[in-house]
């Protein structure tokens, strides 16, 4: 079973510049839940890797985060799929941790948990940090234009990063799922 790494905010659910703070505020992007279910049903293990600095900044607590993740899992399960695992960084930029993307600590933890290499796995994100993390770990970077994806794409066009050449771009997670399932 191939692992597919997914960022959360802006890829699966609506992005908020002021942080998604509760399960009520956690709203899926149209088609994302169904796309996840289809990928799961096809045998892919879906693993979420998400920066959640709102914890460190006091915008929400661990119970709120767990409620958001329970809602996401329930929606995917109701659609016939499964999320294999959720890994998150609870730190802010100022903490200079190893787990905050673009650092690879979350991916290192995923490799350890699943006893596998993530080399050549897809990593779907909407921010430069997601793409940089993917490349640093040898994953295939995928940019979706939802969330911050349009801004990230403009940055890539205006200041091309040679390491990110070959990043595939899709309108949303549903379009990526169609591609991955072909």
Image (cartoon, rainbow, N blue to C red):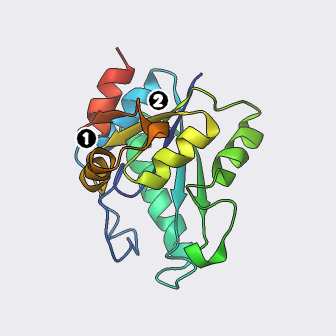
Where is residue 9? Give x, y as percent: 39, 58
Q: Is residue 180 left or right of residue 147?
A: right
The N terminus - image quarter: top right
- Relative height, residue 42 to residue 159 (above, below): above
The C terminus - image quarter: top left
Q: Depth check: 104 or 49 in front?
A: 104
Where is residue 25? Give x, y as percent: 32, 70
Secondary element at tag 2? helix
The answer to whether residue 97 is visible is yes
Q: Read off the residue under disc 2.
A: 40
Of the numbered discs in the image, which one, if any, rests on residue 31? 1
Q: Mark 1 Cα within 10 Å, few/some/many (few <14, many 20+)?
A: some
Where is residue 12? Give x, y as percent: 36, 49
Question: Which is nearer the N-term, disc 2 or disc 1?
Answer: 1
- Relative height, residue 161 to residue 69 (above, below): above
- Relative height, residue 103 to residue 53 (above, below): above
Residue in the picture at 71% in, 46% down = 108
Q: Mark 2 Cα within 10 Å, few/some/many (few <14, many 20+)?
A: many
Residue most extreme to the top: 182
């Amino acid at each position: 079973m191939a692992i597919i790494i997914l960022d959360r905010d802006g890829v699966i659910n609506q992005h908020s510049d002021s942080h998604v703070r509760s399960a009520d505020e956690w709203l899926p992007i149209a088609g994302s839940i169904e796309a996840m279910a289809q990928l799961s049903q096809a045998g892919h293990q879906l693993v979420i890797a998400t920066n959640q600095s709102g914890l460190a900044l006091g915008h929400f607590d661990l119970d709120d985060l767990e409620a958001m993740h329970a809602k996401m899992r329930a929606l995917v399960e109701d659609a016939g799929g499964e999320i294999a695992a959720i890994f998150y960084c609870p730190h802010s930029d100022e903490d200079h941790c190893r787990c905050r993307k673009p650092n690879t600590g979350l991916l290192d933890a995923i490799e350890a948990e699943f006893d596998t290499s993530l080399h050549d796995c897809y990593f779907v994100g909407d921010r430069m940090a997601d793409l940089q993390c993917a490349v640093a770990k040898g994953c295939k970077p995928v940019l979706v234009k939802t969330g911050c994806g349009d801004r990230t794409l403009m940055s890539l066009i205006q200041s091309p990063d040679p390491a990110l050449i070959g990043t595939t771009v899709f309108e949303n997670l549903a379009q990526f799922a169609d591609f991955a399932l072909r």
